[in-house]
Amino acid sequence: MTSIALCTIHSSARSIARLCQVSRSAHGTADFHSFVARYSTLRKCAFLLGGKWSFIRAGTRQMSQASPGRILLGRYGVFLAAGAAAVTGVLTAGVSHFQRAEMATKISKVEEEEGNIRERCKSFMSVPVTDIKVLEQRKDAMSARMEMLIMETQAAFCRALEEVDGGSFRVDRWSRKEGGGGISCVMQDGKVFEKAGVNVSVVFGNLTEEAAKQMRSRGKVLKGKDGKLPFCAMGVSSVIHPKNPHIPTVHFNYRYFEIEEGDGTKQWWFGGGTDLTPVYIDLEDAAHFHKTLKEACDKHHPKYYPDFKKWCDNYFYIRHRGETRGIGGIFFDDLDSPNQEEVFNFVKSCAKTVVPCYLPIVNKHLNDSFTPEEMDWQQVRRGRYVEFNLVYDRGVKFGLATPGSRIESILMSLPLTARWEYMHEPTKGTKEAEMLEVLRNPKEWI
Amino acid sequence: MTSIALCTIHSSARSIARLCQVSRSAHGTADFHSFVARYSTLRKCAFLLGGKWSFIRAGTRQMSQASPGRILLGRYGVFLAAGAAAVTGVLTAGVSHFQRAEMATKISKVEEEEGNIRERCKSFMSVPVTDIKVLEQRKDAMSARMEMLIMETQAAFCRALEEVDGGSFRVDRWSRKEGGGGISCVMQDGKVFEKAGVNVSVVFGNLTEEAAKQMRSRGKVLKGKDGKLPFCAMGVSSVIHPKNPHIPTVHFNYRYFEIEEGDGTKQWWFGGGTDLTPVYIDLEDAAHFHKTLKEACDKHHPKYYPDFKKWCDNYFYIRHRGETRGIGGIFFDDLDSPNQEEVFNFVKSCAKTVVPCYLPIVNKHLNDSFTPEEMDWQQVRRGRYVEFNLVYDRGVKFGLATPGSRIESILMSLPLTARWEYMHEPTKGTKEAEMLEVLRNPKEWI
């Protein structure tokens, strides 16, 4: 694989595109799976390394934060490290001395951060969806790097929750006959957590007509070949419903997509977010949660936190109730600029915040006492959570509508118990009314 | 009103249509309400008494079971009784001696069955949505007769449930600023019933573009005037969730629609159904329930029960689970033949079965003992009920999407409590597995 890559980089960008096609087609073809269904949104521009693109064209595409060289180094850093001398001639056409120095730093950083695949897999909740040998062969491809990241995120989060709960996650490794599979980790009726689910999916195949239509409705028309659009999608998602009403529910999801159009154009994008759904407002918790997310965002772009915070409030909105689902966090989709490496690094930063965002809040309230009335309010709020997930959540809706979806992994996000009281309205001046007020009028927390 | 009707019948069918328009336009114009949203489906043929129709044309429209005279007698029976001699000349053009004799029987039957409006209103849970004086003035219009029927059905069912439970329904009379309103009766956390809701809605206004689009997708394009489609919709709907897992959940709904197209053409149709959702299979209950419905259906058409039983199994299907919601019953929509009177009589027969369908089952299991495991299974089944209602139920989906809907009345159908267990699958050979087997393979019960 490495030699192919080197050879490709030597020849032309067009060959790089071909390489991408090779690694993609190895995934095979199949119907569109729930996972894509759950998280896909049409991207706004073509695949970075699509067949018809040159280095320069790639470089001039929304490049506010990156040079052309950095784009390629992101994806091919490891290849370049293996044969840096050989490719210097190609790469220097269009990059400065400063940029070259930066590349060198980047290469070593990627190696250092992402490390040995086989070694990293040892900490996972299960062997990855893709065969470890294949991951090793393709270790520089974004699909492999993202799969490693989501597996790592799942493991880190599950271990942290197991430590605080004392219980263990049930680990279900499942495959999808159309291509790919997933690892669902669920802890039910634990000491601290009533239901905790952390799911990884890595799926590939072809978009069905229904899925394509759904995507079209969100933006751009995707032109397939003979009506088919090969895709690859992966992500980690989690919803944690604790028992104690003073410990909030948390949700996060980080995902990556690749889609190939009929003319060979590839599109890729990342999406994700982390958001908190408390039963009662705790200003300190809210500030900690948002601050942790803002710090991760600010490392990458000063507009990320304010933009994605707003997007989160808008997305997790229960329209028929006129309430947000919780106190938000960040949410983004269709992220494809400034370049793949930068976006991946941003997603990595976000994924690494899930434990520090949530676990301090869990630990803080672990021994909080609570009343039956507080539990009732928690149950009512969970009912609203169910309403959002079944009525509005794009991913759930689409997943349920897609044949072959693993329903149990999609509906893992529903709480163990929920309640619907007719005409429930908290009395003014109560903590419940205070919570509702926030949900009706989203706030800035930092 | 009577004199207008007589005059109208004397002059022409066109004038009758004009009368209908007068009584409809008195409803005013407004946006499409959740109620229509919840139950509307496009009808397949034009309003019986639409502006351009003659007696004969009305009479020849899908008249397998009724003569032209009977159509008009149905709607204008009371007018005719008040001035039978005056209209004989018009009516005998096209009807035989036998039919005239039949008319006379019908007139007295309608009077006898539907009786004095003010007197009937005394038994209702609340004063009707429409002012009693208006109902009296329009007592022969289908909209008034149907409103009386749904109010009566609500009262009969609520009283029967109150008697068995010992508790009382909370009665909320609400109005809708765009036109009309409703009466929601809810009993929560009773002795027998965990949540029982019986709702009446009578709404009118104009179809919004969204609603019109939704209707179009179900069949025929409706052409409005300046993009507006005046409508009138009403119905009674109920969902009862008992505490004891051996008492099944029941749902019923009976509804009536009128829509006016831009060219003055009116469309009307009825819809409805009653279905049972047990937690455990009881063959005797299932047979009783279906037999009661079949008897009501058989009075009107031998194909109604088999057709509507099948429709019910198909409609209440949780596709992503591969399960029906319950053991069915009957479900129909868009019913507009053989004629308005016949369909109304069929709907009346169905509405009158709700108490005899359900109450004997409630009484039979009132003192059945149950285990915590049986309650858990009940909670899991309720989770599925929520899934159906939020994901598939056309009415709920559309109601939630329609601004100005009374959300609490729409979501009144959700159980007080529900549960989602990851990977829940009953052990083979258990009563739970037996129930699931039936839900996965709908049966004939009689």
Image: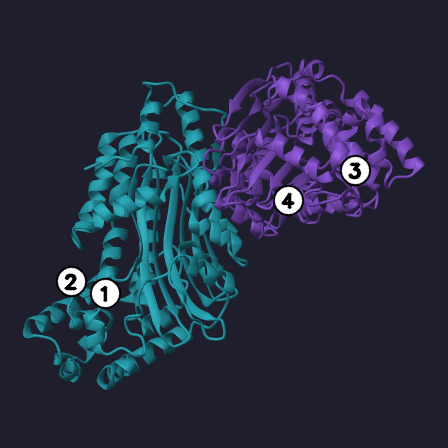
Chain colours: A purple, B cyan
* Residue that carries the numbered disc 2 in the rendered image: B65
Query: Do badges 4 and 2 share one subunit?
Result: no
First reached walking from the N terminus: tag 4 or tag 3: 3
Q: Secondary structure at mark 2?
A: loop
Q: Chain of mark 3?
A: A
Query: Do badges 4 and 3 share one subunit?
Result: yes
Residue B339 is tagged as 1
Residue type of the residue flagged with mark 3? Ile
Query: Looking at the rendering, which quadrant does residue A238 occupy?
Result: top right
Q: Chain of mark 2?
A: B
Instruction: Name the spot of residue A357 as percent of width and height, x first.
Output: 75, 29
Residue at the far left in the pictured view: B97
Identify the residue at horizontal 38%, vertical 68% (top origin): B259
* Residue that carries the numbered disc 3 in the rendered image: A71
Q: How far is the residue under mark 3 from the one under mark 2?
A: 75 Å
Instruction: Name the spot of residue A385 as percent of width and height, x first.
Output: 58, 38
Q: Secondary structure at mark 4?
A: loop
